[in-house]
Amino acid sequence: QDPDLDPPGEPADAAARLWARTTEAYDRTVAAGSRARLESTVGLLRGLAVTGGGGLEAAREHRMTAVQAAEETGDAELTARVIGAYDVPANWTRGD
């Protein structure tokens, strides 16, 4: 496809376009403060933790905030899932 056909302001790279469109759709459809948003954010942080040194550091920085946000909901199962999402796989060399 000719890059001139891309809508203005969209990245030329297919993966970058997918990310931009998906995050826009997510922001439109998933309410801020919802449990689904918290769980998916924790999923992103877990994925970020395995992307490399900087990702692990970023995931660590946000861990307590994620746990506190889950606790604020009063949903013990959600809080347990958020805490469990940070379980360190046995093949990691150290815990976070």
Image (cartoon, rainbow, N blue to C red):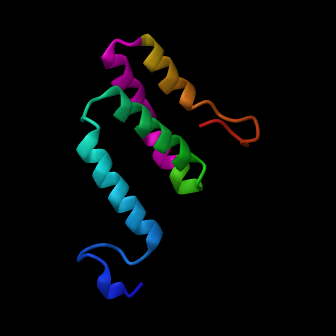
- Name the spot of residue 54 as percent of width and height, x first: 52, 55
Residue occupying the far right of the picture: 91
- Name the spot of residue 67 as percent of width and height, x first: 42, 25
Q: Is 59 one of the magenta-colored residues?
A: yes
- Name the spot of residue 6 as percent of width and height, x first: 31, 78
Measuring 26% from the left and 75% from the top, which residue is drawn there? 7
Given residues 65 and 23, the one toward you in this image is 23
Given residues 45 and 28, the one toward you in this image is 28
State which quarter of the image contains the N terminus: bottom left
- The magenta stretch is 57-75
* Rendered image quadrant of residue 10: bottom left
- Name the spot of residue 93 as percent of width and height, x first: 73, 43
State which quarter of the image contains the C terminus: top right
* Rendered image quadrant of residue 21: bottom left
Q: Is residue 77 above or below residue 57?
A: above
Measuring 65% from the left and 35% from the top, which residue is drawn there? 95
Does 11 sit left or right of 33 as displayed?
right
Does 44 sit left or right of 33 as displayed?
right
Q: Is residue 79 above or below residue 66?
A: above
The mark total stands at: 0
Does 54 sit left or right of 17 as displayed?
right
Given residues 51 and 2, the one toward you in this image is 2
Measuring 35% from the left and 74% from the top, which residue is drawn there? 11
Given residues 45 and 19, the one toward you in this image is 19
Q: Is 14 one of the magenta-colored residues?
A: no
Q: Dominant secondary structure of the magenta stretch? A: helix
Q: Is residue 69 above or below residue 63?
A: above
Q: Is residue 23 above or below residue 42?
A: below
Measuring 40% from the left and 60% from the top, which residue is drawn there? 19
